[in-house]
Image (tube, rainbow, N blue to C red):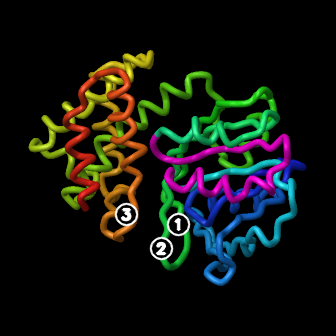
Amino acid sequence: MINRVTSKHWFIAGQGSIGSFVAYNALLSDIKCDQIVRDANNSKAALFHPIGKQPTALPTPITSVDLTLNSIHCLIVPLKAYDIVPFLQQIMPYLADDAAIILCHNGLGTIEPVTDLLTKNMNLFFCTTSNGLYKNKDGIFQAGLGESQWSHVAGNNPEKLSNDDLVPLFVRITQVDNLQKILWQKLIVNCVINPLTALHNIKNGKLAQPKFVENIECIIKETLLVANKLGISLEFQTMLNTVNQVIANTAENYSSMNQDVKSHKQTEIDFISGYVIKEGLKLNIPTPVCQSLYDQIKAL
């Protein structure tokens, strides 16, 4: 059990898997924490199922009606990438002038537009996490305890948050200096696994079949051309090994994009393959394989 107690009052956007994991850990540590939802009529206290322990009912979420102006000093936004900016636009009146905001999502492309929204005294952080979590009608389930990395990405006070503030919430978390490299590593993995598993409607492990080798290698080469041009130092063989390791480690999982397509929900393709394509266009680097996958996902 985590024993550290912090005086910070945390707010979390939504009742998603990561947000509920954080809310559960806050509850264990007696840390003030509220999950914010859009509609009180469609929300209820979620049931969190930790590994090897009894399920725990999380506190009932709140809505913006329950907030007062400038009252949010610490906010975690673990939403789908396309929901980040709309949520923050709605919540802006409730953010304190010196608010610390943590983004936590797949893909890239939100940091710049979010930075444009913030006032000069606010600080923006980014956290990437590999915790094994999934959600169904019975609640949020923890399948594995992963590692998280975080860093300050915008604002004039990088010491607004410390690792001590975040350990009680994420458990295994480390402050890093090379966040962009870590995010690009994860982006490349997502550029391979998400669209391919969604298009072929397969579990991640099926990508180990020989018929996918050429496609996987082409995706990695394309994305590395863009990453390297942006100053991100990554090598092909290292990334190929990483991708194959993730495929093996998550062999029985369905990717988030696969689940979104099956559920007829919007995907994060614009912030995964779409981000690589957009940056490639700026740099005059063609990305035909990523473009093809992007177009096929959009067609779905």
Q: Is residue 227 above or below residue 183?
A: above
Q: Amino acid at mark 3?
A: Asp
Earlier in the chain: of badge 2 and badge 3, it is 2
Task: Check disc 1 and report the residue beneath it.
Answer: 141
> Residue sitting at 86 percent across and 49 percent down?
8
Label 1: how many Cα within 10 Å (few below 14, some 14–19, many 20+): many
Earlier in the chain: of badge 2 and badge 1, it is 2
State yes or no: discs 2 and 1 in contact (Cβ < 8 Å). Answer: yes
Disc 3 element: helix
Q: Amino acid at mark 2?
A: Asn
Residue 291 in percent (x, y) is at 24, 40
- Membership of 92 in magenta stretch: yes
State yes or no: discs 2 and 3 in contact (Cβ < 8 Å). Answer: no
Q: Quadrant of the C terminus?
A: bottom left
Q: Quadrant of the N terminus?
A: bottom right
Task: Check disc 2 and report the residue beneath it.
Answer: 136
Q: Amino acid at mark 1?
A: Phe
Marks 2/3: CA–CA distance: 13 Å
Left or right, 293 with reference to 21: left
Please state which of the two labelled residues, at mark 3 or mark 1, is closer to the viewer. 3
Q: Is residue 162 above or below residue 262?
A: above
- Membership of 180 in magenta stretch: no
Q: Residue 260's mark?
A: 3
> Residue sitting at 41 percent across and 31 percent down?
185
Disc 1 element: strand
> Which residues fall within the magenta stretch?
80-107
> Residue sitting at 38 percent across and 16 percent down?
229
